[in-house]
Image: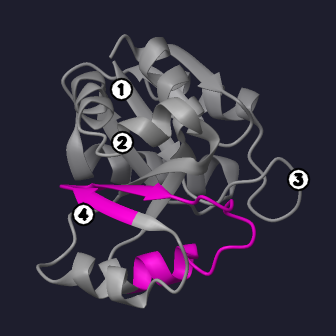
Amino acid sequence: MHIALLRAVNVAGKNLVAMAALRSLFEELGFSRVSTLLQSGNVVFDGGKRAGVALESKLEEATAERLGVRVDFMVRTAAEWGAVVAANPFAEEARRDPGHLLVMCLKAAPAPGAVEALRAAIKGPERVAVVERDAYLVYPDGVGRSKLTTALLEGKLGTRGTGRNWNTVQKLAALAGA
């Protein structure tokens, strides 16, 4: 099984992607056991042995061609997702306040020194840890008021990403059998 996360999709307005259309697209591409979670671009599917950048590129191209929306995909296998869950350095926050703990799946691992540069740029109570291609972000006061924005994260880490709160991470793990 695989988990595909779309970056910056909406159910209304710019980058509109209906989850039914997304499921259909995955099925048309030959994937099986396709399901979506919530309305924010989370797809669990059986992608066979396919993985990596080539799979992400294929999904990005097909979404642009068939749905008319250009978005980034971050894809992890069920085993990789299980590792994301297991590597969480903020276990207490996951237990106590899972809605304020996010995992940001990144397109690529940050360059050496990027995480330290990001930490130095944080002006509030937020905390960050990065494990390979995944950033763990604690927002004690919530994401909405935080200065630790996606633009700051991506700028300092030098790669694009998309975040999901710990509740969604757990739901995706269950769906994928991770």
* Local SS, label 4: loop
Q: Is residue 41 left or right of residue 155?
A: right
Q: Specify the color scheme.
A: one colour
Do the numbered discs 2 and 1 sit on residues whose CB atoms are within 8 Å? yes
Numbered mark located on residue 61 in the image: none
**Residue sitting at the far left:** 112
According to the picture, the residue beneath numbered tag 2 turns out to be: 75
Give the CA separation, mark 3 to mark 1.
26 Å
**Residue 1: x %, y % from top left:** 33, 18
Do the numbered discs 1 and 4 sit on residues whose CB atoms are within 8 Å? no
Give the CA separation, mark 4 to mark 2.
11 Å
* Local SS, label 1: strand
Look at the image and tell me whether residue 43 can be seen.
Answer: yes
- If you read the primary sequence from the N terminus, does the residue marked by circle 2 or circle 1 appear first? 1
Which one is in front, 142 or 164?
Answer: 142
* Local SS, label 2: strand
Numbered mark located on residue 2 in the image: 1
